[in-house]
Image: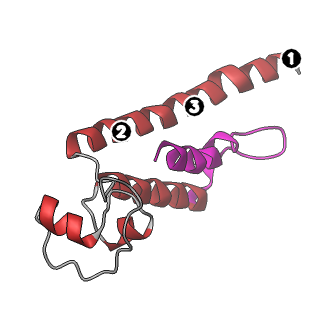
């Protein structure tokens, strides 16, 4: 999940202003798409097992395991068996919230590092 947030955040990190272009925060369509993808990644991180997370194999499991261990009923989507001893990869909600906070902090820190360390140093040299 952390890598998914980093891939999305790379769109903002590498689009700060330079000599021949404006910064990403001056581009409304990029901002919309950025927050749309961040919202989707947040949904994958925090949502309970569902067809979308099952398709991405995030916080999901085999139908039998989800029914027996997690009490989920009415699983209408097809879930292939998991190739693990647990039969699922469902993360407890407390851990998913901590992961979500860590991912958002990672996005913020990398944006600040690029803006105030990397680009500030580069501008002084030029």
**According to the image, label 2 marks what residue?**
99
10 Å neighbourhood of mark 3: few (<14), some, or many (≥20)?
some
Do residues under tags 3 and 1 come within 8 Å of each other at their CB atoms? no
**According to the image, label 1 marks what residue?**
125
Question: Who comes first in sequence, dot 3 or dot 2?
Answer: 2
Residue toward you, 7 or 1: 1
Q: Position of residue 112 (x, y in %)?
A: 57, 27
- Decide: is 52 above or below 41: below
Question: Who comes first in sequence, dot 3 or dot 1?
Answer: 3
Instruction: Indicate whether residue 101 is drawn in magenta.
Output: no
Residue occupying the point 10% across, 64% down: 71
Left or right, 6 with reference to 22: left
Left or right, 96 with reference to 12: left
> How far apart, in angstroms, are the residues tagged by discs 1 and 2?
38 Å
Q: Position of residue 52 (x, y in %)?
A: 37, 70
Q: Position of residue 124 (x, y in %)?
A: 81, 16
Question: Mark 3 or 2, which is nearer the eye?
Answer: 2
Residue toward you, 1 or 125: 1
Residue toward you, 120 or 42: 42
Residue occupying the point 28% across, 58% down: 47
Instruction: Write down the quadrant of residue 103 in the picture.
Output: top left
Residue occupying the point 38% across, 63% down: 82
**Mark carried by residue 110:** 3
10 Å neighbourhood of mark 2: few (<14), some, or many (≥20)?
some
* Highlighted magenta segment, given as a residue range: 1-28
**Mark carried by residue 55:** none
Residue toward you, 95 or 39: 95
């Amino acid at each position: 999940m952390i890598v998914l947030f980093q891939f999305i955040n790379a769109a903002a990190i590498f689009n700060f202003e330079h000599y021949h272009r404006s910064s990403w925060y001056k581009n409304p369509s990029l901002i919309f798409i950025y927050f749309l993808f961040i919202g989707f990644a947040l949904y994958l991180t925090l949502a309970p097992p569902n067809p979308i997370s099952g398709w991405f194999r995030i916080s999901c499991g085999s139908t039998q395991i989800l029914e027996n261990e997690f009490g989920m009923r009415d699983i209408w989507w097809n879930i292939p068996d998991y190739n693990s001893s647990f039969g699922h990869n469902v993360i407890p909600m407390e851990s998913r919230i901590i992961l979500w906070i860590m991912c958002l902090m990672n996005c913020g820190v990398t944006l600040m590092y690029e803006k105030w360390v990397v680009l500030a140093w580069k501008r002084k040299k030029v």
